[in-house]
Image: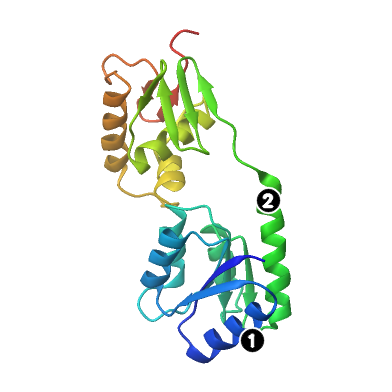
Amino acid sequence: MASILLVEDDAAIRSAVTRALSARGHVVTSEPTGMGGLQAAIDHRPDVVLLDLGLPDTDGLTVLSMLRAVSDVPVIVVTARDDGGAVVKALDAGADDYVIKPFDVAQVDARLRAVLRRASTEGPEPALTVGALVVDPAAREVVLGGRRIELSRKEFDLLHVLASNVGRVVSKRELLAEVWRQPYGGAERTVDVHLSWLRRKLGETAAEPRYLHSVRGVGVRLVDPDA
């Protein structure tokens, strides 16, 4: 049994899928709009989200990008767009799987079970240690020299990406893609501002870096200052 959030604007489809999946033992809640679905995913933390792409208020891909910025919940995209391009965009935006309308609910149920199996075998990501800095993705906590550091969501995500690539220069374009879900570039000034805030909380500056070293024209590298 899984808790499922269905984001679908068609009332008939919403009702039919809810009944069919409930009959298979799942707990199903539903929302008819993208923004309502996003809020429900944040508030209720379902095991899986079934997300229609053709929503009345916001495009499903936009909802998916916004959801991925705040949650790793498995997402199965449900779409009538069978041109292939929409599916590729959805998978690139962070979808775990997809089904094409019209569909058999048994197929949806099988895909639900598959993404849940994958999620359960992955397990929590271990903490990352760089010198006296510890980044714990599971608890979303950062400890520096034994003292917990309070970070905003984006500051944590930024530090997590850098800690996952310790010693390697990560470009601002990569950071925009990983943290802000802007794979085709965007406002690099956003990265600079968040790096400035992050440095302040780590007790360093751009002029006197310890952990975060900027490489002019390339990106940022996280290093162990005591190595």
Which type of secondary structure does the marked residue at label 2 adopt? helix
Taking the spot 51% from the left edge, 74% from the top edge, the residue there is: 29
Mark-to-mark CA distance, 1 and 2? 29 Å
Residue 110 x, y percent position in the rendering: 73, 70
Q: Is residue 170 visible?
A: yes
As drawn, is 58 to the left or to the right of 61? left
Question: Which label's residue is closer to the chain start, 1 or 2?
Answer: 1
Check disc 1 and report the residue beneath it: 102
Crowding at mark 2 (Cα within 10 Å: few <14, some 14-19, many 20+): few
Residue 18 x, y percent position in the rendering: 58, 81
Q: Nearer the viewer, residue 116 or 104?
A: 116
As drawn, is 221 to the left or to the right of 6? left
Three-letter residue code for mark 2 = Ser
Colour scheme employed for the rendering of this structure: rainbow
**Which of the image's four quarters has the N terminus?**
bottom right
Check disc 2 and report the residue beneath it: 120
